[in-house]
Amino acid sequence: MSWLPPDDDDLDPYGEYDESSVRARPNPKANRPRSKQRPAHVDAVVGRIVTVDRGRYLALVDENGEEEREVITTRARELRKTAIVTGDRVDVVGDVSGEEGALARIVRVHDRRTLLRRSADDTDVVERIVVANADQLMIVVAAADPEPRPRLVDRYLVAAFDAGIAPLIVVTKTDLADPGPFLEHFAGLDVAVVRSSSEDPPVDELLAHLRGRTTVAVGHSGVGKSTLVNALVPGAGRATGHVNAVTGRGRHTSSSTVSLRLPGSEGWIIDTPGIRSFGLGHINPDSIVTAFGDLAAIASTCPRGCTHLPDSPDCELVEAAERGELGPLGPQRLDSLQRLLTTLTRSAY
């Protein structure tokens, strides 16, 4: 006896069903319309990002309040493409108790007043944010061991002027060499200078410049930056190192960017890892000219596309300097401006 498949009529003898009458189970997630609306998070608390470490952010909440505490946070999914850096002000939700094992979530980043940025090299226009909301850039350089590098300091100054951050130069190890010849490079700039010996950092003098401000410290490895930070903030415990006698270079000791509150002050010092290069590929030269207020007004009358360099034709700044119309410090300030503008065209360190 052979077996044959049943006819369709045998399966549905009354003809009540066909393919159009079969309805698949709906998938509520697939059929739900997507929305860009996000929760308002009205219960969020404001925090200051103190440091960043491998996808975790240490935030200080209730700053200067009775319940000030540090909270470990992660970023919300919608912020996965947003850079969050030391110095940022953020809105935090979730477990903000600060207890061991607690983890909160960053849901918003506040508008930044300033951004200190650098690029990988001078040909790279992709910016890397170093810190946010800093008021002052403390450029630490050694008078010797390692030898000072004026052009690297120029790069720091360019970044500070571009960010609208006031620069401060601190020369360490002045007991090893006279910093005078080095500082002559910056005589035309209105930048405060503090000198420090190896054994006796001028803490009081430095605090006078740092008090009430958020200052980010930068410098070449081995210049004594972390030593200064430890003197300013007792108990900070920032690692210090020495300079290699063969290469003349310092060893990287600080591996992370950390915000530290200055004792007895509303000021903050942000210590950054020592670096040997500071790319400026993202900088607009016009922002450097703007930083020289007395020269910027004259530069505004220059021909379109003027570089303001010594060989630039019909440059009003160059001609004013030749006529002696820039004042006593004018030639020095013009030289400093031209050197900083030239720095933008040099190769990265």
Image (cartoon, helix red, strand yellow):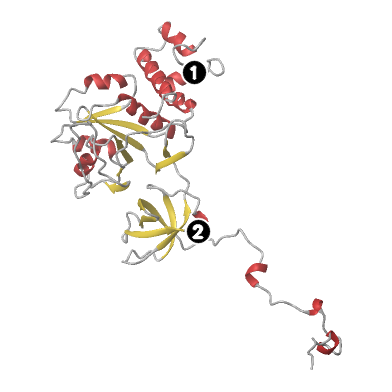
Q: Identify which residue is drawn at 40% across, 16% down.
A: 334
| Residue type indicated by callout 2 | Arg
Residue 123 visible in the shown view: yes
| Residue density around tag 1, few if under 14, some if 14–19, many if 20 or more, within 10 Å | some
Q: In the rendered view, would you say 254 is above or below 26?
A: above
- Read off the residue under disc 1: 307
Q: CA distance from mark 2 to mark 1?
A: 45 Å
Describe residue 317's horizontal placement relative to residue 329 as left or right: right
Q: In the rendered view, would you say 227 is above or below 293?
A: below
Q: Identify which residue is drawn at 24% across, 19% down.
A: 181
Describe residue 275's horizontal placement relative to residue 88 as left or right: left
| Residue density around tag 2, few if under 14, some if 14–19, many if 20 or more, within 10 Å | few
Q: Identify which residue is drawn at 16% across, 32% down.
A: 197
Q: In the rendered view, would you say 84 is above or below 227?
A: below
Q: Position of residue 26 (x, y in %)?
A: 68, 74
Q: Position of residue 273 (x, y in %)?
A: 30, 42
Between 56 and 184, the residue placed more toward the observer is 56
Q: Position of residue 240 (x, y in %)?
A: 20, 43
Between 198 and 63, the residue placed more toward the observer is 198
Say whether disc 2 or disc 1 marks the residue closer to the N-terminus. Answer: 2
Question: Any mark on residue 77, and which?
Answer: 2
Question: Any mark on residue 231, and which?
Answer: none
Look at the numbered disc 1 and give the secondary structure of its residue.
loop
Quadrant for residue 230, please give it.
top left
| Residue type indicated by callout 1 | Thr
| Residue at the extreme top | 323
Between 163 and 31, the residue placed more toward the observer is 31
| Residue at the extreme front | 1
Rendered-image quadrant of the N terminus: bottom right
Residue 45 visible in the shown view: no
Rendered-image quadrant of the C terminus: top left
